[in-house]
Structures are given as C-alpha cells and as structure tokens.
Amino acid sequence: MSERARSARSIRRRLLYFLVPSLLLLVVGGAVLSYGVALHIAVAAYDRSLLDPALDMAENVRQGANGPRLDMLAQAQEALLFDSDDKVFFQIRDAQGAVIAGSPELAPPPPMNVGEPQFFDGKHADTPLRIAALRVKDGFTVQVGETLNKRKRIVREIIAAELLPTAIIALAALGLAWTVVVRGVAPLSKVRSEILSRSPNDLRPLDVREVPVEIAPAINAFNHLLAQLRGSSAVQQRFFANAAHQLRTPLAALQMHVDLLLHSELPNNLRREIEPMQASAARATRLANQLLVLARAEAYADRSRPMVPVNLQGIANGAVQEWVPRAIARDIDLGFELADAPIVGDATLIAEVLNNLIDNALRYTPSGGSVTVRCGVGSEGPYLSVEDTGPGIPESVHERVFERFFRVQGTPGDGAGLGLAIVKEVAEQHAAAIKLETSRTSGTRIMLVFPAAPQTQTSTEVVSQARTATHPREPQTQRSEAPSS
C-alpha cells in the first residue's frame, strides 16, 4: 500500500488534518481580531489627544477690526503643538474657507456639522498626516494634523506583543491536538498491537472491557468472526486428530505383521518385496504420529494452555536416553552436553520438539557420524540445540524448511517434512527464537533460545557429558562451564 493510501485511510491523520488547520485558523483569526481591537483603541486614544489642541485654538479665535484672528501667543502655540516624536501642523479657516492662521498647505476639510469633530488622513507637503478637524458655531474650521511616527511605533509594538502569545498559543494548540488525537486513537493502537502480537493459531476473543463504545461494535463483530474460526478450526483439528488416531491402529498392525513375516523363513524374492512394505509402514506410522503431535500443539495454542516452570536439562536427558538404542543401531555417536536451563513452558511439547530434532538428525546423519544434544543458559538466554554431521541444509531454503510437508530436493531419508513444522509451532507458543546454522564440516545445528525464567541462576552450572559411540557406556559427569550459545 502506498504512503498516500495509508495517509488517506489513517484515522489519526484525518483527525490531525482537520484539527490542526482549524485550530491554527482560530488562533490566527483570534490574533488578527486582537490586533485590530488593540490598534483601534490606540488610534482612538491618539485621535482624542489630537483633538485637544484643535479645541484650544477654536476657543482662541477672535473677531478683530481686520477680521478674525487667532488670539494666542507664539510661545503658547509652540507649547500647545509641541511633540517630541511627531511634527504637528494646524490651520484655521473662516466661514468662506479662507485660511486665517496656520499652514496653508493643509487641504480644506470635508463638509462637517458644527460641534462634531472628524478624524481623517491627509498630507502636508507629501508627508502623511492624521488630522483632527472641528467646525465651531461662528463658522470657523480648525484642523490639527500630526505625522504618523507614534502611530507606526504603536503598530510595531502591538504586533510584537501579539506575536509571542500567538506563537505560544499555536504551539499549545498543536500539542493539544496531537495529544487528543493520540489519546483518542490509543485504544485502536492497543487493539492493533494485540492482534499483531498473536500467533495465527491464537483465536481467543479480544477484551472489550476497555474498548470505547465507538469501536465496540467492530470488536464484537471481530470476536464473532474469531468464534466462527475457532469452531471451524476445532472441527478441522478433530478430524485431523481422529483420522491420524484411526490410522495408528491399522498401521501398527500392518507393521507388526510385516515384521513377523520378515522374521520367518521366506524366499528371497518374496523378502525383497516385503522389505519396502516394512519401510512404507514405518513411514506411514511416523507420519500419523507427527500429525497427532501437530494437532495437539495447535489445540494447545487455541486453548492457551498455561505454562509452568520446567527445566530443559531434565527433558533433554530423558529424550536422549530413549534415543540411544536407535543411535547405536544406526552406528551414530549420540552425545549430550546438558546444563541447568530453567524456563516456563510445556514439558510435553518441548519433549516432542526435541524428539523431532533428534529423529531428523539421526535420519540424515550417515553411519559413523555424530549427533550432539546441548542445553544450558547462554548469553541470550536458556537454549536447547541439536547438532549433527549430516549433509546440512542449503541457506537458500532455511526459511522454507519450517513449512509443512516441505523437503529439500535430493536429500536422503524418508521424512514427510513435518518435524521442523512442529518445532516452529511449539517455538512460537513459547516465544522462542529458532536459529539454524549449516556448514559443510559440521552439518546442521538447530537451536531454540527461550525467554529466561524469573530468577534464573546462571553463575555456576553442572554440565553432564556423555557419548554413546558405537557401544553404550556409562554417562560421565564433570564440572565445566555451560556451552556458549
């Protein structure tokens, strides 16, 4: 799926794409509104201050012998119009519009009502001004204008004062949106993680106790689907197990009769015909047994059978002792190096795993070779391994050998391709990592590394070592360090 498709289908991104621009728009809009209000208040204050000298001048206009004039000393005018930041200009016109005092460069004011001041923008020699104009009852019009230095400065100050709070509010809005969205979709992420962490055989229903009501129907529907899958899987497993179980009895009888025939006096040509039957019966019996083991392992996964503390050393020791006679019969040196390796798991399934690994090793190791079983606690945790001196497994098929009924082309033996599938199934149930190593000199080594059991002691371990060689001998016990994983 492309990145664009993932983005379009992501609830988190959809919410963020809606919330972030909306919140930013609200923040920017609020900042612009605040700026406009603050600027209006500041401009209104300066306009009122500009009206004061216009009122004073209007009160000091007198009608003299030569016409109207401004009755105000020059010093008083300077004091009234003094401003440290701006230049202030004034103009007084009579009722006919003639300039009687002040700067003639100011344009005539717009029509006004008596006693109603007006504020507008104008110019004085191309210099922008803010002008306050007032018309008195005698018909005189007074204008006072000032340059815009203070006003421009207050605009910059308002912008600076708005910028920092706006940036903080914007960042807070982004953080709030992200937090709300993340917390809102957290239950979905939890459900997703729970589903992804499960094995394909774990069909238990999802917990709906902490699920939000908005996604509860989807979870309930999913649980209903899981229930249907559990039922279908249970039917298949029962059929699988029953068929394999029903096959065991006739296969065992067939193998017993073939063995009895081979132990009786038979013509050579008839013996040559019966011997392949014996091998086929043995292979079919082993296949039925493996199918039963695989069905049992899958059934345990569905029921989530509780794990208990077990020790790999005891399991490995018991399994090796059972396989010693078969190794001797095939002229294979079966040895073991076992150390204390406590884990939490299912002893029955782990024993089946070890039996399959030893069986495979003995089947593919030529006469005169060796097979070594090891267990202990290494740097990565408790481990169980089986190593042989067989032909090895090509690296190109390391992943496929764990598939059901897969066999490497051209390999000897009569296996059905289920042994390593059982190993993988049980390893997944125990959260164990599988390592497969192959070399031309040492054959194949398959190791299972298990999670460490609580309060595992690994400082000093007793390692028991023994080999069957061609003839059995008493196991030897000695103290040494546990083999490294």
Image (cartoon, rainbow, N blue to C red):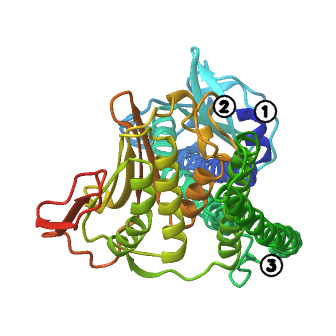
Task: Answer yes or no: is residue 139 visible.
Answer: no
SS label for mark 3:
loop
Q: Residue at x 88, y 69 (%)?
A: 232
Q: At label 3, which amino acid type do we have? A: Val
SS label for mark 1:
loop
Q: Are the residues tagged 2 and 3 within 8 Å (C-beta)?
A: no
Q: Could you tell whether 480 is left or right of 140 in the image?
A: left
Mark number displayed over residue 64 = none
Q: Nearer the viewer, residue 155 or 300?
A: 300
Residue annotated with mark 3: 213
Q: Residue at x 75, y 54 (%)?
A: 11
Image depth: mark 1 or mark 2 in front: 2
Q: Could you tell whether 270 is left or right of 160 in the image?
A: right
Label located before the other in sequence (1 or 2) = 1
Seen as rendered, the residue at the extreme left is 479
Picture layout, residue 221 above or below residue 104: below
How far across and how far down the image is residue 397, in percent?
58, 32
Q: At label 1, which amino acid type do we have? A: Pro
Residue annotated with mark 2: 121
How far across and how far down the image is residue 436, in percent?
45, 42
Mark number displayed over residue 110 = 1
Q: Residue at x 37, y 70 (%)?
A: 312
Q: Nearer the viewer, residue 38 or 417?
A: 417
Q: Are the residues tagged 1 and 2 within 8 Å (C-beta)?
A: no
How far across and how far down the image is residue 429, in percent?
57, 66
Image depth: mark 2 or mark 3 in front: 3
